[in-house]
Image (spheres, coloured by chain):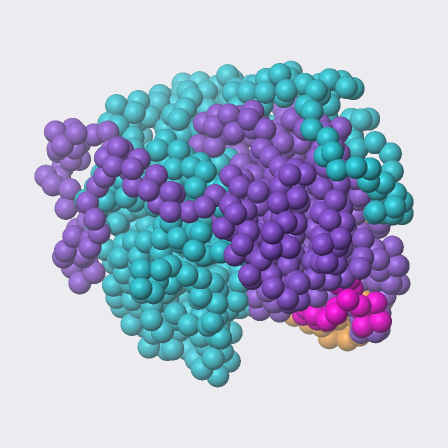
Amino acid sequence: MRFTPNSDAVVQEMLNSIGLQQLEQLFDDVPDQVQMKRPLDLPPEMSEMELYSHLSHLAGKNMAAAEHPCFLGAGAYDSYIPAALDQLLLRSEFYTSYTPYQAEISQGILQAIFEYQTMICQLTQMDVSNASLYDGATALAEACTLAAVHTRKQLIVVPETVHPEYRQVLDTYAISGYYEPVFVPCPDGIMDWDRVAGIMNEQPAALVIQHPNFWGHLEPVEKAADLIHQAGGLLIMVVDPLSLAILKPPGAWGADIAVGEGQPLGNALNFGGPYLGFMAVTRKLMRKLPGRIVGQTDDVEGKRGFVLTLQAREQHIRREKAGSNICSNQALNALAAAIYLALLGPRGLKEVALRCHQLAVYAQRRLEEAGFPLLYEKPFFREFVVKTPDAAAINQRLLAQGMVGGLEVDGGMLLAFTEKLNRQDIDRLVATFKGE
Amino acid sequence: MQVPKELMYTDEHEWIKVDGERAVIGITDYAQHNLGDIVFVEVPELHAQVASGDAIAVVESVKAVSSIYTPVGGTIVEINDALEESPELLNQEPYEQFIAIIEMDDPSDLDDLMTPEEYEKFCQAQG
Amino acid sequence: MSQLIFEKSRPHSNKMTIPPAEVGHVDINKTIGEEYLRTGELPLPDLNEVETVRHYTFLSKRAYGVDDGLYPLGSCTMKYNPKIDEWAARLPGLAGLHPYQPVETVQGALQIMYETAQWLSEITGMDQFTLQPAAGAHGELTGVMMIKAYHNKRGDRGRTTMLVPDSAHGTNPATANVVGYRVEEVKSDPRGLVDLEDLKSKLGPHIAGLMLTNPNTLGLFEEDILQISELVHGCGGLLYYDGANLNAIMGIARPGDMGFDVVHVNLHKTFGTPHGGGGPGSGPVGVKKHLEEFLPIPRVDKRQDKYLLEYDYPHSIGKVKEFYGNFGVVVKAYTYMRALGREGLKEASQHAVLNANYVKEHLRDTYHIPFDRLCKHEFVITAKNQMDSNGVATMDIAKRLLDYGYHPPTVYFPLIVREAMMIEPPETESRERLDDFIATMKEIADQAVDNPDVVKNAPHNTVVRRLDEVKAARNPVVRWEESGDV
C-alpha cells in the first residue's frame, strides 16, 4: 500500500517536463560508490487488509493492562479516559498539523496550548508554564539545568525517594556539565532529613523533592523548602498532577520550579510513551524556562491572537549558546491533558483524586488486616509499598487471576490505585495476596 | 547610522565612553538596528567582577539574541535598571542608554578598541 | 472573536459524575493530614461536555493540517499520515500496555520494537538502533552523548570541539553545546556543499566529530561525502548523520555506507507519523558496531523467539527518557514501513525528489535559485527578485500563501541564504496539487510587481491578521487570568 498519487505515466510526463528520462537520473549527483546496488533487504509491501490482520495479531500477543484490574503505577497510571477525548484528538487539523510557527493559520493549536499553560498554572499554582516537554524525567533534567544556570551553582541534591528512572535520566543529562547531581540514600521511605540537611552547606543549586514520592508517600515539603531557600538554592518539585486536585500545590509550598509527568491527565499508557512532561516556574525564572511558550498578543486590527513567544531562548536562535536543544513539545499529549481537565472540571478531577485515595486507603487497611503491613509507615496519596518477601510469587498468582500486580521492589510490592479499580478488584487482590 | 566621535568601539558593536577610571558600555546604533525591536535586556549583575571579554548582559529581539561582551575587566559599579522595564530604549536612544559602568582594573584594556573612523569602516565591510 | 475556555466557564455546568468508591469513610484530614491539603477552590474551567466538545471542535477549525492541503515545509517532510497507522496505535493490545508489565505479557509490543530497529538498520545501513529518544533533537542529544562516551572510554579526552556546517539546523550546534562541546562552523563553498579546504583547516586532535545532514539543508547531496568521512575519521573524529532529510534517499543510498558512525531518524518526518501540532515525535538513533555498547538501556533483545528488555550494558550512556521511548509513535512508523515495504520506501524517495525538482524547474523563471543544481527532496529559492524590485520580502510571500490556503515553506532558513524559502513538496502530493502551488507562487510574484501592498499586508483571509510579536515578547502574557492579565 503506497501513498504516492502520481501514476507511472504522470511520473514520466513530469520527468520529461524537466528534461529527464528516468527517475534514476534524479540521483546522478550521488557518487557511484555510495549508491545502493541492491534492493533493501526487507519484506514487500502489504495491503491494508494484510496490515489489519498483522497488527491485530501482534496486539493480540499482549495482555492489555488497561483491560484488566491494574495495580501498576510507578510513574504511569491506568486512568479512565472519557470517550469525548479521543474523538477530539482525531480531528486531523490537530494531529496532522506542524508546530504553529505560522500563527495566522494555527490559532486553534496556539490557543489550546495557551489554555493548557493556564491549566498547568492553575493546578500547580505557579506563575508560568511552558507548552510541555518530552516527559516527566526529561522535564526534571531541564529543571536542574535551569536551576544551575540561574543560581550559577552546580550541585543538585536528589533524595533517592525520587523515581529511579528520573534519577537515571538526570545522571545521563549531567554529561552536559551544567549541573552535578548528588543522590542521597533514604532508607525510610521519605527523604533522609539529616543527610539532606548535611549537604546544604555545599552551595546547592537546588533540592529536588518528588511529592508524593516514588513510594507514594508525602515528603516534609515545608521544612525542605525553608532548608534549600536558606541555602540559596531553588526548590524543584516533581508532582503527580492528579494529586494536585486535593494536595497543596507546589506554588503554595514555595517551589521555584514544578515538573511532572502529565500522562495521568487523559493520556493512554502506550507502553511508556508518548507522554508529556509539564514544567512551570515562578515569574522571575520565565525567560530561562526551556521549551516552547505561547503568548497572547494582538493582530494589526487589534484582534486578540496567540503566538509562540520568547523564542530568543530557543535553539534555532541561540544555536551554540542554547541551554537546551529542545525544539518540540508534546503538543498532542498536552492537548489531551487540557481536554481531559476540561472534561473532568474542578469537581470531577477532585472526585477522581479522592476516589484513588479512598481505594488506596481501603486496600492498605485490608492488606494490613491480612498480614501485609506497609513497608514504610507514612501517609500516602494513591500508592504505597506493601511489605512482603514474595512479591514475585504473588504477582504470578495475580496474573493467573487476570490481574496486573504491582511493581516488585526490595522487600515488597509498590501498588498503585486508579479510579478504574473498585472494591471488588481490591478484595480479589487481597484474597490473592493471602493465597486464597 | 550614527557613530559619535567621542566614543570608542568594539568589533561586537559595543560603544565605550571613558570617564576617568570608569568605562561606560552600551550598544551601537548599528547593533540596535540589526537586532530589530529589542524585547528584553538581561542586565548585568551589580558589583560583579568581570574580565575583559566576558559576556555581561544579553539583549533579545523577537528573532535574535546577542550577548554583550565587556572589552574591559573590572567591577560593575552601575547598571541601567530602566532597560528591564523598557528595553525599547536601546532602539530609541542607543547612545543615551548604557548597559553597564565598569570600574576598570587595567586601562590598557582600552588599547584594542576602534576609533569612530575605524568602526565606521568596519561596519561598512560587514554590509 | 475566539473565546478562551475559561471565559466560557459557568459554575456547576460540568455534570461529569465519578462513582463513589463505596469503601467506607475515609477522612482525608486524618489519612493525609490537613497541612498537606489544598485550600480554596481548584481553579479549572467548569463546562458541560457539550460545550467542551464544541470548544475544541471550534479550535480545530482554526488550525491547518496535512489533511487540509499542501504543506511544503522544508526539512520537515509533511507527508500524508495514513489512517491505518492511527488505528493500529489505538489497538487496546498496544495502547493499553503498562511499561512495567512482565515481558511475557508484552511480546507483541517488543516484537514491533525489535523489528522496527531492524528495518531502520537496513534502511540506514547501521548495525543497531535505540528507539528511546522522543524527538529528532532528543536523538541528536543521545547520539552526541554516545560520541562523547566513545572518546571518553578510549581515554581520548582532548576532543573538545564539534564541527557543524554553517547551513546546519539550529539543533546541531545547540545539541553539541548541551553535551559540553565547543562548536566550530565549517563553511559552505559556492556549490552549497561542505567546503573541503575549510574542513581540512579545522580538523585536528581536538575534533570530536562532524554533524552533517545529507542531503543538506539546501537540498543538495554532499557529493564529497566519502572524502569528508575519510578526513574526519583520519583525525580520530566521528561522523554524525542528522536524519532530517532521510526522505530523499531511502533505498538509494545509506548513511552507513557513506561512513557515518551515528544516525538519528525522525519517524515523524520520514516514516509518516503525524506531527501532532508540534509533537509527539520519535527520534531513534542508529550506530555502527563500535558504538553499540554505548546505546541507552534497556535494549530490546531476542533470544530463542522470546523478546526481552536487556539492561546489562555497563558502558551504556544510561537512560535518556522514562521507559522505552514514544512507543505509540513507533507503532505508527512500523505500520507505515510495513505498508510500503522495500519497493514502496524507495518509490517514496524517488517521487519526493521528483516532486522537488519539478516544482523547482517550474519556478525557475520567477524566483531566484541561489544554488541551481539537481536537488534532492527539497530546494531553496529566495525573494531576491521581489525584494529588489518592490521590497517584497520572503515573509510577505509566506503570509500571502496563507490567503490561498497553503501552509508556507520554511522561511529564512538555512541562515546562509538571504530571504530563503525552503520548499519540500513530499511524495504524497499529486502533480495537480504541485501545479496549483506553482501557479499560486507565480501569481504572488506577479502581485509583488503589480500590487506589492496586497502581498506586504498579507494575510487578508485568515482568522487573525499579522500578529504583534514584539508586544508578545516585551510584555509576555502567557496564561489567562480572571483580570485578563498576568
Magenta residues, start to end: A179-196
Taking the magenta stretch, the answer to whether it contains residue A189 is yes
Residue drawn at x 47%, y 32% is A95
User: What colour has chain A?
Assistant: purple
Judge left or right: residue C237 versus residue A137: left
Q: Position of residue C364 (x, y in %)?
A: 27, 34
Q: Is residue C81 above or below residue A191?
A: above
User: What colour has chain B?
Assistant: orange
Question: Which quadrant of the figure has residue A70?
Answer: top right
Residue A126 visible here: no
Question: Which quadrant of the figure has residue A347?
Answer: top right
Residue drawn at x 21%, y 41% is A45
Q: Quadrant of the N terminus of chain C?
A: top right
Judge left or right: residue C309 versus residue B99: left
User: What colour has chain C?
Assistant: cyan
Judge left or right: residue A211 versus residue A116: right
Residue drawn at x 10%, y 39% is A21
Report the residue that reaches farthest toward the bottom.
Answer: C155
C220 or C419: nearer the viewer: C220
Report the residue that reaches farthest toward the left.
Answer: A21
C317 or C139: nearer the viewer: C317
Q: Is residue A204 above or below residue C5?
A: below
Tally of marks: 0
Residue drawn at x 51%, y 35% is C277
Q: Is residue C93 above or below residue C176?
A: above
Residue A336 visible here: yes
Question: Which quadrant of the figure has residue A103?
Answer: top right
Q: Quadrant of the C terminus of chain C?
A: top right
